[in-house]
Amino acid sequence: MSRRVSVIGLGKLGASMAAGIASQGHDVVGVDINQAAVDAVNHGRAPVQETGLDDLIAANHPRLRATRSHAEAILSSDISFVIVPTPSDERGAFKLQYAAYAFREIGRALAGKPDYHTVVLTSTVLPGASRYGLLPILERSSGKRCGEGFGFCYSPEFVALGNVIRDFLSPDFLLIGEYDRRSGDHLEAHYRDIVDNGASAARMSIENAELAKISVNAYVTTKITFANMLAEICDRMPGGDVDVVSNAIGLDTRIGRKYLTGALGYGGPCFPRDNVALGFLASALGAPADLSGTIDRLNRGIAERLVSRLVGTVHPGATIAALGLAYKPRSHVVEESQAIQIVKALVDRKYRVLAFDPLAGHEANQELGGRALVLDSIEACLQDAEVVLIATPDPSFAQLTAADFTRGHTRTVRVVDFWRHLAPALQGAPGIDYIAYGRCGVTPPSEPNPLAELWEDAVAGFTEGA
């Protein structure tokens, strides 16, 4: 069945949603206050960078258009997805001014529309924000009552930048916070004609859905932080190997292997802020907020802890290369990037830092303000490096060989691989001191063994005279 859909906000998620819905044979009109974004969509181009978005918009151009008019979009559709920024405030909660503006304009349009219309908020908000903050704006602006003149749902997406289109069309599940059954039925019917995989729908109250959204991301940050703790332990434990441990405990169905790769901390525009927001909500309601605060503190401290260990073994003023600057591979986004934090910490300690990222070079250069030298190629980045940090598991880095690091060098190059991806190519290679973070070699008999020291006194009475 062909549907008529509007998407309010044409950022990375909104534009990808609009293109994805159009690709399923539906008529879509996008809305954005940015004329450049509107013009790009109307000319068959992506208004933002996201994997596959340019091609998808071009292929579905006849069914996808854009406008700056909320009224035009509302009158041309039966359901609207609102996906506008909800930035964090100084408390850790989410600001609503962009959503409030969109809801006011949507409400004004609904005032002149006789047909039933469902408004779906997709932006992340905290419990109570929809019912007590935004819905009253819709009702005042439209002169109608929710549940009578229009429907409302809160239905956020669970997508990862770089895979937004795939994740949107093939979700793990559909989260629907419904004002009433009619609203939920209307939204679910649309989803059934959009998603590819027949995902199950979890339908609930608006507030429970708002909590569920931030809870998913906060739980994932907890799992990542636990894996990173294992990596720090294994990096210090003689014979320790975080991958061996993670592979084993990941076989337990209560745990699972996903997000259990110990390395650098999490970053990006969602995980850090959603974890903090859950802590804010818990504290505001008088519930313990210790877990969220501890996770955030541990994650934010990873870069400093790693750099502190590194500088104890690297001479002052050394040239250090950082490969990978985005918060994850295949992304232009450097927000809350662990690699950026490491680079800043090294520059603060007066090291000369060279850096490269296949996609995020421009964004990283802006974030670093010229304090490190962001180069255009891996080769240039490695040319003078005495120490190389593999900060993201980008596929292009996996193709590197020992010769790429040692070319033209007479000295030994230290390579610290936080993701352990280059071990097969670099472990034991001449001219390379390869360090796989999260793995610790067996302590030679001539050196102190911290594990042996830990238990010597505990069994002293049983070993004497044995």
Image (spheres, helix red, strand yellow):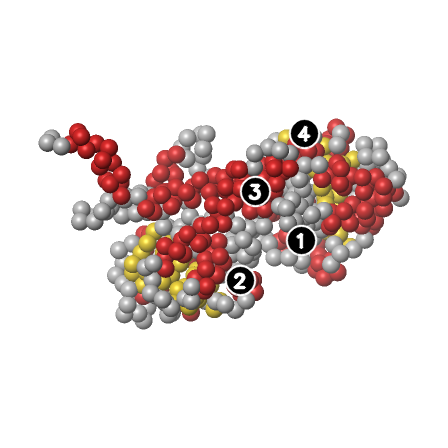
> Residues under labels 1 and 2: Cα distance?
20 Å
Image label count: 4
As helix, strand or loop, the secondary structure at mark 2 comes to helix
The percent coordinates of residue 143 (x first, y second) are: 88, 40
> Residues under labels 2 and 4: Cα distance?
41 Å
Question: Which residue appears at 56% of the width and 42% of the height?
Answer: 275
Residue occupied by mark 1: 11
Q: Earlier in the sequence, mark 3 or mark 1?
A: 1
Q: Earlier in the sequence, mark 2 or mark 4?
A: 4
Residue 364 tag number:
2
Q: What's under tag 3, amino acid-wise?
A: Asn
* Left or right of residue 186: residue 348: left
Q: Nearer the viewer, mark 3 or mark 4?
A: 3
Question: Which residue appears at 56% of the width and 37% of the height?
Answer: 289
Residue occupied by mark 3: 275
Question: Which residue appears at 50% of the width and 41% of the height?
Answer: 294
Residue 110 tag number:
none
Q: Earlier in the sequence, mark 2 or mark 3?
A: 3
> Residues under labels 2 and 3: Cα distance?
24 Å
**Callout 4: few (<14), some (14-19), or many (20+) C-alpha neighbours within 10 Å?**
many
> Residues under labels 3 and 1: Cα distance?
23 Å
Question: Which residue appears at 50% of the width and 42% of the height?
Answer: 295
